[in-house]
Amino acid sequence: MRSYFIYITTNPEKEVLYIGITNDLKRRLFEHQENKGNPETFAGKYYCYKLVYWERFVKAEDAIAREKQLKNWNRKKKEVLIQTLNPKWNFLNSEVFAEGAF
């Protein structure tokens, strides 16, 4: 069964939020890591490679709808969402890359 993910990354100082969608969270996080500092992409330009939130979906259209919804939210509402599942804003990259995850 295929999975689709919406995710939120931030920079190390937690100043900027990036919301994305992918069908391969590990690969996408690796790409963000590799692109850090790249001025040609938003996430790269602002060093948004630290995962702080994600959701999994079975249907692509559900993930797309959720991504659009979150992108329309203000910063405060996004912060509240992150804090519901990750109150300390821990960086979750290592959990995604852990053996057997996903």
Image: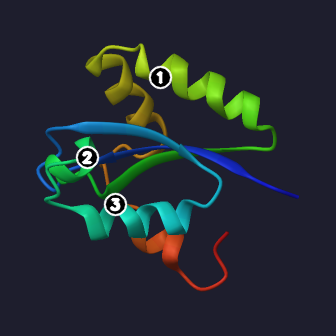
Q: Residue at x 29, y 70 (%)?
A: 34
Residue positioned most to the front = 40
Q: Earlier in the sequence, mark 3 or mark 1?
A: 3
Above or below, comparing residue 95 to residue 1 in the picture: below
Residue 14, quarter of picture: top left
Badge 1, how many Cα within 10 Å: few under 14, some, many 20+? some
Question: Which residue is under mark 2?
Answer: 41
Q: Amino acid at mark 2?
A: Thr
Mark in front: 3 vs 2? 2
> Disc 3 vs disc 1: Cβ atoms closer than 8 Å?
no
Q: Say which of marks 3 and 1 sits in front.
A: 3
Image: 2 above or below 10? below
Residue 60 lies, with reference to residue 101, above or below; the image says above
**Residue under pointer 1:** 70
Tag 1: amino acid: Leu
Q: Which residue is mark 3?
A: 32
Lower sequence index among marks 3 and 2: 3
In the picture provided, is 50 more to the left or to the right than 72?
left
Secondary structure, mark 3, is helix
SS under mark 2: loop
